[in-house]
Each structure stands twice: as C-alpha cells, then as structure tokens.
Amino acid sequence: MVASYGSLSRQGQLAKENAASARSWGLIFLVTSTALLVVQLGLGLMRMAQPSAAASGFFPQGIPIVLYVLVCVVHLVVVILAVLRARRGEVVRLPFPRSAR
C-alpha cells in the first residue's frame, strides 16, 4: 500500500487520490503495528530478565499483543471496505480525519 502511490498516481485523478489514501493508511498501520510489537517484545524481555517474579497470567503483559490483533482486524475491515468502494469508482475516505498535504 505504501509503495503503490508512484505507479497508481499516473493512472488518473481517482487512482491518485485512492493511492494517497492507501499510502496514508499503510503508514499508519505499519507504525502502529510495529510499535505494539516492539512494546510486546520489551515487556517480554523485561519479564524474562526477572525470573524470580511470580507469574501473573496473560494480562497485563498481553495487552499489546491483544491490541495488535485488534489493529489487524480493523486493518482488514478498512482494506476490504476500501477495495469495494474503489471498485465502484468512488474516492476512498479513511476512517479518521486526513492531515493536510
């Protein structure tokens, strides 16, 4: 999605706007998912560094991975809805306000 802007922007105004939306959504998904996975890794490493700590179950250490799964589900829904809208020849609107370009 992030890399598609260059080739799609030459195929007309509709394709250019949809490619810009895809690029924005791809960057947001990439940053969010990477940050959640890094937080999960950090929590896991801290947990491993303290072997004497009593096991407290999945939560609160599992919150980042649950949020990651939730972000992935939202990503799939947004992509499916965007594909359906683009196939109808409409401009894809992201589920959040766009920043100024």
Image: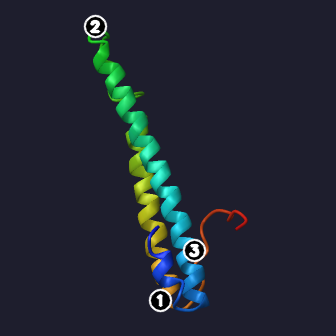
Q: Which mark is residue 20?
A: 3
Q: Is residue 68 above or below residue 94?
A: above
Which numbered disc, 1 or 2, marks the residue that appears first in the sequence? Answer: 2
Query: What residue is pinned by disc 2?
Result: 52
Element marked by disc 1: helix
Which numbered disc, 3 or 2, marks the residue that appears first in the sequence? Answer: 3
Q: Is residue 43 above or below residue 77?
A: above
**The C terminus lies in quadrant:** bottom right
Which three-letter amino acid code belongs to the residue tagged 3? Answer: Ala
Q: How many residues crowd around disc 2 within 10 Å: few (fewer than 14), some, or many (20 or more)?
A: few
Element marked by disc 2: loop
Residue 95 coordinates in the image, percent (x, y): 60, 65
Distance between the alpha carbons at the discs numbered 3 and 2:
50 Å
Distance between the alpha carbons at the discs numbered 1 and 2:
56 Å
Which three-letter amino acid code belongs to the residue tagged 1? Answer: Arg
Distance between the alpha carbons at the discs numbered 3 and 1:
16 Å
Query: What residue is pinned by disc 1?
Result: 87
Q: How many residues crowd around disc 3 within 10 Å: few (fewer than 14), some, or many (20 or more)?
A: many
Of residues 16 and 84, the one drawn nearer to the viewer in this rendering: 16
Which three-letter amino acid code belongs to the residue tagged 2? Answer: Ser
Residue 40 coordinates in the image, percent (x, y): 38, 35
Residue 28 coordinates in the image, percent (x, y): 53, 57
Tell me, yes or no, whether the two marked residues, 3 and 2, touch with CB atoms within 8 Å: no
**The N terminus lies in quadrant:** bottom left
Q: Is residue 65 above or below residue 84?
A: above
Q: Is residue 4 above or below residue 27?
A: below
Q: Residue shown at 57%/92% (left/top)?
A: 12
Q: Nearer the viewer, mark 3 or mark 2?
A: 3
Q: Residue shown at 53%/88% (left/top)?
A: 10
Residue 56 appears left or right of 26: left
